């Protein structure tokens, strides 16, 4: 008995010492103290990639998410059901995995595109709400009772492994999205706690240990609370023991009522009006509306390059990141219009990235025009779409206002360590004069148009500073979607 008590005391002491050695306890109070890794705060721009079996039908009505195809098909979406009957007859959604060939998927080409876009990280859907895995997850096959991963059915390739190998040849950080719940997983509906213990946790740990992602982006959390998902325990393992503990970035989708309250980075989705002045955030959005490939969307449904560049600037000026989505098709091709948008954003960033990468929020994110309303809400052209999803809403807030509305005429970012302020103009002023209100500069200060390297004359005019721009020359001033001035 004495020996047993001594052994228990030793084990208790050992456990206590282990816990003390681990800096993060499985509580939100402790986990929320972990700082956002510097590499991510400096990155500013990432690419979301929604890819899976849902790319085979690749369809939904405009204003909906194509990656939710199975959910609508097996519930009450009559438009999806009709589309499915016409194109696939009586075949089940699960049978469509046989048509997910990815035969044109060239990971090195994808990686080169991502690098040229100026994005500094990617987030690939390792598994969406349908449960299909883009890696050889034997757990998925066992839980579902049939082949349900990309090595067993469909491409017969480890899509995550191939893409990560290619991306790691560039300066882009590889990351993964993982859906906690699965719409029709029988184990999830039988016993959620067993589903978490025997399916979710093994899969998440396998992903982290096998692929070592720099980003781990969870979703599908909203039906149960964080204690069922055991979210705090997983994050404690991730931060204390995992192979990515020193660099991984996580987010806020970990259970009912967690989002926007706990988590390292908040995740607004098509919510450009949300501001988190005291908490880091990343807004995600598609180029059209759907995240997954949607063949129903037309060219005019895609957000213009100018609006995407301005969206990036807007997020960064407010202290956040932009996660811009692409939806490859079932063959493994990224639609050309998406490639074009990424390349054009990369063109602008190659000239003006100094005002984006590694910056922080200044005392104010923007300067509004002196007159006009600031509460613009676009009209609803599509009853399925809420105003915040309107692709070109940023143009109305900057360069193309409706009558009676003001605009954001300047955005600001800063690099305090370099004593540098950046003023970014959405529009090149006709009179070539930029006025920064309630701002003063010393006689040793300088102003430079970043894209051309030209020094700009400036003067103090009362409480304001006036900067004079050069004559506009379209052949010399490339990527005309916004203009950045460095002030030192």
Image (tube, grey):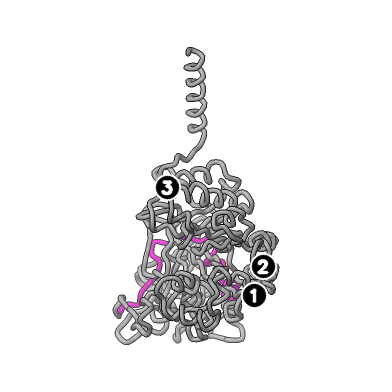
Q: Position of residue 52 (x, y in %)?
A: 57, 68
Please give the range of residues in magenta: 345-371
Of the two numbered discs 3 and 1 on the same chain, state the one appearing first in sequence. Answer: 3
- Of the two numbered discs 1 and 2 in the rendering, the one whose residue sits closer to the viewer: 2
Query: Where, by quadrant of the figure, is residue 118 drawn?
Result: bottom right
Precedes in sequence: disc 3 or disc 2: 3
- The residue tagged 1 is 331
Depth order, front residue of 350/83: 83
The residue drawn where x is 64% and y is 65% is 153
Decide whether residue 236 is among the magenta residues: no
Q: Residues within 10 Å of mark 1 (few under 14, many from 20)?
A: some
Q: Position of residue 224 (x, y in %)?
A: 38, 54
Q: Looking at the rendering, which quadrant does residue 279 occupy?
A: bottom left
Asked if the magenta segment contains residue 347, the reply would be: yes
**Which residue is the extreme one toward the front?**
90
Q: Residue at x 42, y 82 (%)?
A: 399
- Residue that badge 2 annotates: 155
Q: Residue at x 55, y 74 (%)?
A: 91
| Label at residue 32 | 3
């Amino acid at each position: 008995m004495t020996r047993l008590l001594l052994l228990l005391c030793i084990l208790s002491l050992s456990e206590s010492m282990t816990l003390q050695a681990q800096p993060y306890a499985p509580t939100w109070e402790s986990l929320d103290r972990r700082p956002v890794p510097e590499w991510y705060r400096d990155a500013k721009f990432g690419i979301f990639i929604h890819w899976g079996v849902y790319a085979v039908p690749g369809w939904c009505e405009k204003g909906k998410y194509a990656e939710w195809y199975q959910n609508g098909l097996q519930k009450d979406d009559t438009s999806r059901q009709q589309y499915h009957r016409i194109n696939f007859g009586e075949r089940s959604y699960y049978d469509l995995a046989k048509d997910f060939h990815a035969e044109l998927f060239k990971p090195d080409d994808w990686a080169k595109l991502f690098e040229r876009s100026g994005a500094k990280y990617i987030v690939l859907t390792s598994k969406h709400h349908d449960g299909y895995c883009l890696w050889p997850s034997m757990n998925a096959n066992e839980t579902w009772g049939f082949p349900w991963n990309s090595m067993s059915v469909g491409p017969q390739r480890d899509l995550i492994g191939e893409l990560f190998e290619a991306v790691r040849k560039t300066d882009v950080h590889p990351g993964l999205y993982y859906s906690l719940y699965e719409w029709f997983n029988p184990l999830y509906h039988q016993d959620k706690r067993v589903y978490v213990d025997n399916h979710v946790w093994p899969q998440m740990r396998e992903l982290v240990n096998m692929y070592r992602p720099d980003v781990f982006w969870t979703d599908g959390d909203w039906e149960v609370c964080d204690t069922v998902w055991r979210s705090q325990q997983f994050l404690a393992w991730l931060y204390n023991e995992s192979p990515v503990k020193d660099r991984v970035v996580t987010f806020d989708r970990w259970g009912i009522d967690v989002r926007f309250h706990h988590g390292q980075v908040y995740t607004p989705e098509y919510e450009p009006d949300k501001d988190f002045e005291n908490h880091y955030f990343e807004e995600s959005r598609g180029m059209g509306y759907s995240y997954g490939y949607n063949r129903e969307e037309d060219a005019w449904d895609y957000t213009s390059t100018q609006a995407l560049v301005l969206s990036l600037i807007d997020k960064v000026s407010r202290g956040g990141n932009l996660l811009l989505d692409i939806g490859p098709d079932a063959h493994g091709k990224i639609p050309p219009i998406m490639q074009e948008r990424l390349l054009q954003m990369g063109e602008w960033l190659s000239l003006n990235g100094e005002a984006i990468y590694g910056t922080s929020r200044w005392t104010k994110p923007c300067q509004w025009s002196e007159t006009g309303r600031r509460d613009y809400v676009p009209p609803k052209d599509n009853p399925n779409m809420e105003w915040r999803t309107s692709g070109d809403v940023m143009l109305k807030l900057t360069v193309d206002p409706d009558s009676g509305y003001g605009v954001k005429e300047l955005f600001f970012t800063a690099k305090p360590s370099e004593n540098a302020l950046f003023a970014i103009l959405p529009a090149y002023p006709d009179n070539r004069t930029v006025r920064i209100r309630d701002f003063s500069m010393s006689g040793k200060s300088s102003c430079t148009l970043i894209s051309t390297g030209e020094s700009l004359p400036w003067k103090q005019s009362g409480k304001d500073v006036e900067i004079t721009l050069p004559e506009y020359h379209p052949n010399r001033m490339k990527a005309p979607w916004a203009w950045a001035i460095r002030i030192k």
